[in-house]
Image (cartoon, rainbow, N blue to C red):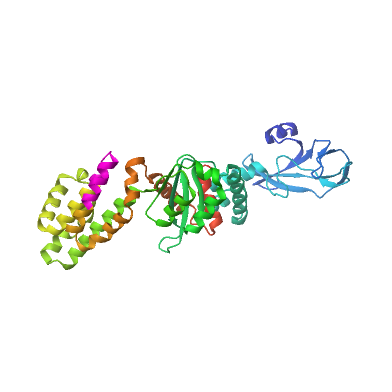
Amino acid sequence: MPIALLTELLELPQVVVTDYELPDAKRLIVQLAVELPAALCPTCGQLSTAVHSYGSPRTVRDLALWGRQCYLRWTPRQFECATCQDTFVERLAWLAPRHHHTRRFEAAVYDLARRTNGVEAAAHYGLSDESVEGIFQQSATQQVTRRGYPTVRELHVDEIASQKGHGHYRLVLSSPEVGVLDVLEDRQQTTLEAWLTARGPAWCAAVQEFHADMWRPYHTAARAYLPNVVMTTADHFHVIENLHKALNTVRRTLQRHADEATRQHLKGSRWLLLKSPAKLTEAEQLRLTALLAAVPELRQAYDLKETFRAIYTLRMPQEAAQRLTAWLEQAQKEGHDAWQAFVTTVQNWREEILRFFVERGSNGFAEGVNNKIKLILRRAFGCASFAHLRLRIIVAFGA
């Protein structure tokens, strides 16, 4: 192949190909010469044309060519600056200082590691896991730094378990406007407050809505640091989740103390009771009717569940407040003992629950983010360090 054509195929600025060799079936080594007659002094920023000396030949990895691993080899020049008398090695636009791979090769490795995981990227490019990790960390850090923290109108907060069952939670801050803003190492109130403090008053003042589950430290921090959030909202999906847990507690309590005939009615009825009546099949509706007729106490709890769910269909905040007050009175009077924990939760979070009927917002976006994060962690076979976990999550959402 003509050398000039190989220069065109490489599409690298500042250099020309002078020779090439094929040492084995997998590799291609391309010999380069730098065309530029001058280099920019990194100390004073002046151009220098005085070559002081030549260094030892360097070889770096580039993108594959002709189906082979491509390596670029050249002899770096050291210049002497006439302005500041400093000596320096010329820098090339396509190679970061002291790196062993070209910028475009590192970009390709980073893109594959981001979409899959470090193990697959290392196997695909024939690199060590450590090399891929280093490329990913540096590229992701640069990308996250460039993006910074854009202002948002909505701020969503939710936690993820870095290891299921170990009780160690990370805090994910996100917004539909930008994706994931950041990942914090724990869910402590002081950690969230420190993050909000670092964003500054102007950033905090831009936030108009705050959505989180029913974990009081989140709401306390939001009210203290987000001046334009009139009232935080308790995510209604988490409220309904707690409602379902209460009903299931009633079912299990009844089943534990019931006679054999009642126990048979209750067996395997969990999802039947939790499922929306509108989504029940005809056979499921018949079974539910028989179950509730056989266990009156369960009928009472089930009716309370459906009455509460119906509140969320209302459009007017005042009507919702009245219905919630009536529901609390009925639940306290008629509810099973196992139901009272949920009643207490509703009483404690009444204002935040009713805020939903003003903003009609939810933390559904954060729940979607969490589902994607679970896929990321499974695909990456977990993350050994928090720093890597944080970067991998943020860049996965387009940082």
Indicate yes or no whether the magenta region holds residue 341. no
Q: Quadrant of residue 256?
A: bottom left
User: Is the N terminus in the top left, top right, bottom left or bottom right quadrant?
Assistant: top right
Nearer to the camera, 172 or 300: 300
Residue 27 appears at what percent x and percent y?
A: 67, 46
**Residue 218: image location, x then y, percent:** 43, 54
Residue 31 vertical position relative to residue 197 in the rendered view, above or below: above
Question: Residue 322 magenta-drawn?
Answer: yes
Give the x, y percent position of residue 21.
73, 43
Along the horizontal axis of the image, is 374 left or right of 128?
left
Q: Is residue 265 left or right of residue 383?
A: left
- Frontmost residue, 227 versus 395: 227
* Foreground residue among 72 and 186: 186
Q: Please state which of residues 14 and 145 is positioned toward the viewer in this rendering.
A: 145
Q: Magenta residues, as a range?
A: 310-327
Quarter residue 72 falls in: top right
What predominant SS class does the magenta segment belong to? helix
- What's the residue at 60%, 49% (across, down)? 141
Q: Confirm whether residue 73 shows in the render.
A: yes
The image shows residue 164 at horizontal and vertical percentages of: 41, 60
